[in-house]
Image (tube, helix red, strand yellow):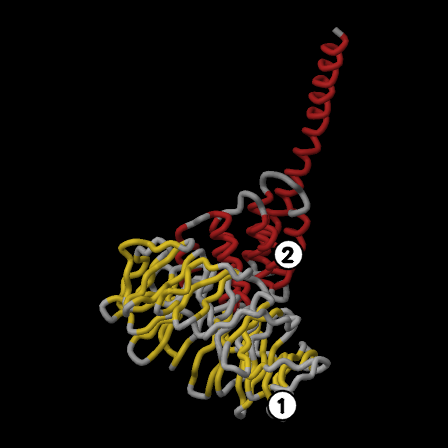
Amino acid sequence: MAKKLGLALVIVALFALAWYNIPKLESAQKKQGTLVERAKGYLEERAYVTAVDLLEQAAGFRTKMLPDVEELLKEAYLGAGGFERQYTDLLEKQMGESGAQADVFLEAAGYFFDNNKLQNAILALKEGVEKTGDAGLTALFEKERYAFTYSQGTYDDITDFLGAYIQVKRDGMWGIANRTGQMLIPCMYEKISSYSGGLALVAKDGEIYAVNNKNQRTALLKKKDIDLTAEDKDKPVRDVIDFGNIAQSRVAVQMSNGKWKRASTSFTIAAAEYDEVGTHSSNYVAVKKNGKWGVMDSSGDYLIPAEHDGVVMDAMGRCYNQGAVFVRDGGTVFLYVSGKKVEGKEFEDALPFNTEGPAAVKVNGLWGFVGTDGEFKIAAKYEEALSFSGHLAAVRQGDLWGYLALTGSFGIEPQFAQAKSFYSGSAPVLTETGWKIIMLVEFAKGAGLF
């Protein structure tokens, strides 16, 4: 009985509070309405600054009229000039509301495009697509999302990205740059590995050694003019004569007998010898032993036994991603998934899968793209192609390279003499003046589409 009485008292109190606030609500709406009507008059007279003052007061009342007040306020901000920050702040507020409609994102994108703020425009479209799924926004986003700029630096040669850094060549010497083209290790080496785990291997003046991000030597693997066959147990120098790329805390090194071994980034070298060793990706690596190729995991166990004519690797030596690898036998390339051959899927050539997206394969002399099931996602009709990476794939059409989107349409029209794969919004391209790195505008300040 006491609980029922208490509940009744709460209900009565709530009704009383509502009745008490009705006059205040009506008063707020009336004041807001008066301010708006006055502001409309000034808008008609183009007295925008006065209208801004009145409408900002009106926006302080949280009534059902507020959306209309905000639309008038944006008009006043734009008309007055000098209120760009207030206008964009209001747009941001409206886009952040749970019920935001597509038109506010379209308005924001249009404003940023008109004011040469391409990154802001693309971000507004992206947010609108995520929140509303609107078809018009999606179409405009797909049209504009691959706008790019050139990062600093031009190079004589360049590799693919392996992680966030890339090997670059100037004046005949190699160094390391990041995805914006900023140099990490200067171009002063005859050869340099990929940079990973805070280290890169370098060759210079007959020596092979490791350097850190300050270009300081951290380990010596081959010393100039040393007798590598001499017995010297105190000598901290291995008989390394060449090296591959560092990835996932591992690197392949070639010994003085011509054989390759796998080593850690502390440069502990495993005993097992191979004819050749690739670069680790997704904890797997291609190895050649006794003239035949296979794929092994990081612990040295074979996923695919070394009994094949070849394992398809990319330019950086990687072969394995998304659980898939291409194996070559008798001039034909076969798809293996989780270590097992996918029956009925045969290709003339292929390139490895990247961490996401279809892989490039060749049939009937032309390149297309397949998923890990071996089924074509984009038909084979290109003269050359690289596998998808970051939702884009480099393809050659005629003499020029561009980038396909997953839709099968060009995200970036063919315009480059050569092109390499994207990583985190950046990709190397060959221009008339040399190799440069293009960077998707949306990534310019660290944001990410993919």
Residue at 48% of width from left, 85% of height from top? Answer: 157
Counting the numbered discs, the total is: 2
Q: Is residue 350 above or below residue 32?
A: below
Considering the numbered disc 2 on the image, is that residue within a helix, a strand or a loop?
A: helix
Foreground tag (2 vs 1): 1
Judge by depth and name the residue closer to the eye, 432 or 109: 432
Q: Is residue 273 left or right of residue 5?
A: left
Q: Position of residue 220 (x, y in %)?
A: 66, 82
Asked where in the image residue 368 lies, by quadrant, the reply is: bottom left
Q: Earlier in the sequence, mark 2 or mark 1?
A: 2
Q: Which residue is mark 1?
A: 227
Residue 449 seen from this side:
no
Q: Which residue is mark 2?
A: 52
Q: Is residue 25 left or right of residue 394?
A: right
Q: Residue furthest left?
A: 364
* Three-letter code, disc 2: Val
Rendered image: mark on residue 277: none
